[in-house]
Image: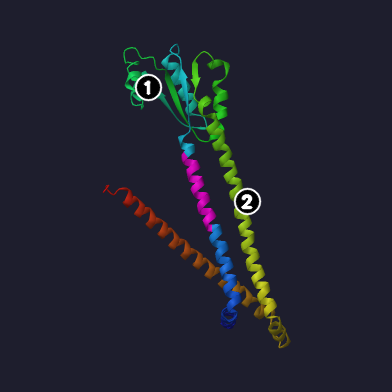
Amino acid sequence: MQSLIRLKRITLLGFKNYIRNGWLSTAATLMLTLTLLIITIFIVFNLIISSAINFAKEKIDISIYFNDRVAEEQIKDIQLKLQVRNDVLGVDYIDKNTAYKIFQGLPIKDEIKILVNPEDNILPRSLKIKIKDPDSVQNLTDFFNTESFQNKIDYISTKDNQAVIDRLVNMIKFSRWIGIMVSGLFFVIALIVIFNTIRLTIYARREEIEIMQLVGASWEFIRIPFLVEAFFYSLLATVLSSLILFIGFRIIKSFQNFSALMGNRPPL
């Protein structure tokens, strides 16, 4: 019971010190709020970039086009071998009829579409491979460039989009590196802000601390109130930054809804 009373007194003393050091407490809270805002905004921005990159990764696939000499059983056997690979999400077999339907649905001129007909279908059969990671594109390309596939495959689609894949891989690596570096930097900044704020508070009240030592106050009674002040700095800064972010997101959402409404508005 006595320990609880002692803790209550120390906590109240820390709160009173926070209120008493008005300008210093306000400056420290605002600095910490700004730091938390920057960290949170960067985290949200990094999540948006990661979502966009993941969306782009899902769109990356490899198409393997086979010549007409390859039997359908051989293609399906290759499909089964690919499906058990760890770097492959799924494999779809596109036969000539499916390829014809896809070709007819392309946004091209009818003069070109009539060159291909179901009776004399010159479109190749293919395997459409969904990959887990862009880094595995090269492994699959090397797999199909082996001697056993030389007389079976006419074309591999990675030759067209290799530049896009390489750019995406570099972007993923760069965003991860930047995310780790910047998050660590702002975390260190937040710690420095709190540490220096406590140091300034101790320096501003050095005479009061000396008096407390002279009258026999314990080290816990002197030190813990500063920790309580640091807790109030962090708590208030967290509340303020969360409130600002909430209001900011609501304003952005309102502008988006307004823009969508104006975009659907009929012309005058």
Residue type (three-letter) at the residue carrying disc 1: Ala
Can residue 228 be seen in this snapshot? no
- Picture coordinates of residue 212 (x, y %)? 69, 85
Amino acid at pointer 2: Met
* Residue 171 position by quadrant: top right
Q: Is residue 169 above or below residue 124?
A: below
Magenta: main secondary structure = helix
- Residue drawn at x 43%, y 21% is 126
Asked whether 53 falls inside the magenta stretch, the response is yes
Relative to 196, 142 lies left or right: left
Of residues 217 and 38, the one nearer the viewer is: 38
Q: Which residue is mark 1?
A: 99
Q: Position of residue 186 (x, y in %)?
A: 61, 58
Q: Position of residue 100 (x, y in %)?
A: 35, 20
Q: Tell me, what colour scheme is on the image?
A: rainbow
Where disc 1 sits, the SS reads: helix
Q: Which mark is residue 124?
A: none
Q: Residue at x 55, y 66 (%)?
A: 33
Q: What is the spatial separation of the Cα atoms under label 2 and label 1, in whole angstroms?
A: 47 Å
- Which portion, as a residue range, is magenta? 40-55
Q: Which residue is drawn at the image coordinates 65% and 80% (left, top)?
A: 221
Please, is residue 254 above or below residue 205 in the view?
Answer: above
Which residue is under mark 2? 181
Q: Residue furthest front?
A: 268
SS class of the residue under badge 2?
helix
Badge 2: how crowded within 10 Å, few (<14), some, or many (20+)?
A: few
Quadrant of the image containing the N terminus: bottom right
Indicate whether residue 41 is drawn in magenta.
yes
Q: Residue at x 61, y 75 (%)?
A: 24
